Each structure stands twice: as C-alpha cells, then as structure tokens.
Amino acid sequence: MLVKNENEWCWCLCEHVGYPQKSIEDAVKDFAETYPAEEVPMIRVGNPYYYVPTVDAERVINDIIDYDLDDEIAEYSEDYLLHVELKQIDVLQEKLTKAFREWEEQNGYKNTSFVILETINPFKNKE
C-alpha cells in the first residue's frame, strides 16, 4: 500500500523530481541549488508516497490450502482452514505483516522508492 509521508517534500518540474526534504523551503532550496533561478517559480512540490508492504493473510491461507497441503492428505482435509473467522484473519495479517517488515528492514530490502501523487505551487498567491 502507498503511504503518504507528510513530513517530507519533493520538488517537481515536468518529469523531474527531487529527493525528499524536511520542508517545502528545503525542497525549493534543493531545486534552486541546481537549476536556473528563472525556473524556480515554475516548480511544484508534493509529499512523497512510499510503498509499505502488507501481507495478505487470506492469500497466505489459500496458498497453504491450494499448494502446500500434501496430496496424500488433501482428500482428508477438505475443511482445513475453511471456517477461519475474519477477526482471526486480521490478527494473522498483522503478525505476518509485522514479521515481513522486520525481515525486510534487517536484510536491507526496504523499498525506498517513492512517487508524488499531488502537487502544489509554493509560489502561488505570494508576492
């Protein structure tokens, strides 16, 4: 799922996007350090959205039933995990997601890519 980081700002100009900064002012300053001054009023700024993984517990349960259950016992396990309550699925999902995110962080797999979905012009109505 994409999660908006409201504590960071990026400058945007056409297809170019700057790295996240701590404030709108820092994003504008970052742009101004590299690009011509006349282009500064044309930029837009926006909060980055990062991908934060969520493990789908229902999909995990279905995967176990459909692919992990050995053929030798499958015919005797028709009702295995068939009546799992939604509350139990939610608890499992929280635990699996927590474990995955910890594993991801510990092993350096955390996704640091981001997208900008909405922007504003920081110079609009300023004189």
Image (tube, helix red, strand yellow):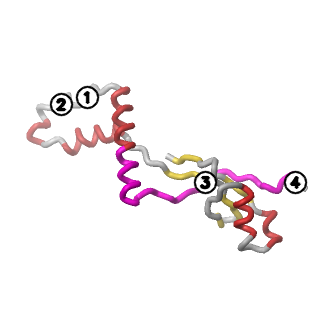
Q: Calculate the distance from the C-alpha at mark 3 to the C-alpha at mark 2.
A: 46 Å
> Mark 1 = which residue?
82
- In the rendered structure, which amino acid carries the disc numbered 3? Pro
Mark 3 vs mark 1: in front:
3
Q: Secondary structure at mark 1?
A: loop
Which of pointers 4 and 3 lies earlier in the amino acid sequence? 3
The answer to the question of whether label 2 and label 4 lie on touching residues, with beta carbons closer than 8 A, is no
Query: Is 124 covered by the magenta stretch?
Result: yes
> Mark 3 = which residue?
48
Query: Is 119 covered by the magenta stretch?
Result: yes
Q: Secondary structure at mark 2?
A: loop
Eyeballing the image, is 16 above or below 47? below
Q: Calculate the distance from the C-alpha at mark 3 to the C-alpha at mark 1.
A: 40 Å
The segment highlighted magenta reads 99-125
> Residue drawn 74% across and 65% down?
29
- In the rendered structure, which amino acid carries the disc numbered 4? Lys
Q: Which mark is residue 126?
A: 4
Mark 3 vs mark 2: in front:
3
The answer to the question of whether label 1 and label 2 lie on touching residues, with beta carbons closer than 8 A, is yes
Residue 85 in the figure: left or right of residue 24: left
> Mark 2 = which residue?
78
- In the rendered structure, which amino acid carries the disc numbered 2? Glu
Position in image of residue 117 (x %, y %): 63, 52
> Residue drawn 8% across and 40% down?
72
